[in-house]
Image: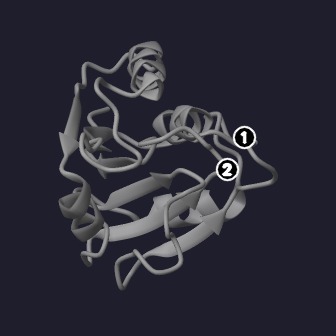
Amino acid sequence: MLRHRLIHPQINEILGRAGHHATILIADGHFPASTKKGPNAELVCMNLMPGLITCAQALEAVLSAVPVDAVNTMMYTKDDPYALDSDPPVWDEYRAVIKKAGLDLQLAPIEKWSFYDAVTTPDHVLTIQTADLQRYANILLSVGVRMD
């Protein structure tokens, strides 16, 4: 039995092959995961029904399994139908999950269209598609180096 919290066999296999600087996208239910992915990325659908699972739940599982040295969010827009005037509430959930994992990482937002570009690179190895319905819940993790 695995010691970390992540028990999904396919995700564990992909993460086991990932190295430093590989990226993992945890996508919300609105993200076009079938068309916005890198040439080496595998898509794992975890969207059972609206709200299950959430991006925060997926983040907790992934952080238990691999070292992460950067966490990027998709920056919200301020001038379209999906505009927000402050950080999405889900970002506070991410900060709590990161802190609970004992990591000293800050969320680093990437402009929306640049975020889409970031997930189409060869370093992108995995997209976990969730059913999270919160706006701007997409989160991109960069695999770090194991220090122990």
Q: Amino acid at mark 1?
A: Gly
- Please state which amino acid type lies under the numbered disc 2: Ala
Determine which quarter of the picture holds residue 103.
top left
Answer above or below: position of 39 versus 102.
Answer: below
Residue 27 in the image: x percent, y percent? 50, 54
Between disc 2 and disc 1, whose residue precedes?
Answer: 1
**Quarter-of-image position of residue 55:** top right
Q: Is residue 130 left or right of residue 76?
A: right
> How dense is the environment of label 2, judged by Cα within 10 Å: few (below 14), some, or many (20 and up)?
many
Gap in angstroms between the C-alphas marked 2 and 1: 5 Å
Say whether residue 55 is left or right of residue 113. Answer: right
Q: Residue at x 48, y 59 (%)?
A: 15
Q: Residue 131, labelled with which disc?
A: 2
Indicate the quadrant where residue 72 lies.
top left
The residue indicated by pointer 1 is 51
Task: Count the marks.
Answer: 2
Q: Are marks 2 and 1 in contact (CB under 8 Å)?
A: yes
Front one among 68 and 25: 25
Please tell me which residue lies in front, 10 or 90: 90
- Describe the element under mark 2 as helix, strand or loop: loop
87 shown above or below 39: above
Residue found at x 40% / y 69%: 125
**Residue 53 image position (x, y, % from top left):** 70, 43
User: What residue sits 70% from the left and 60% below the top?
Assistant: 9
Q: Specify few, some or many for label 1: CA neighbours under 10 Å numbering under 14, 14-19, or 20 or more.
A: some
Looking at the image, the residue that sits furthest to the bottom is 39
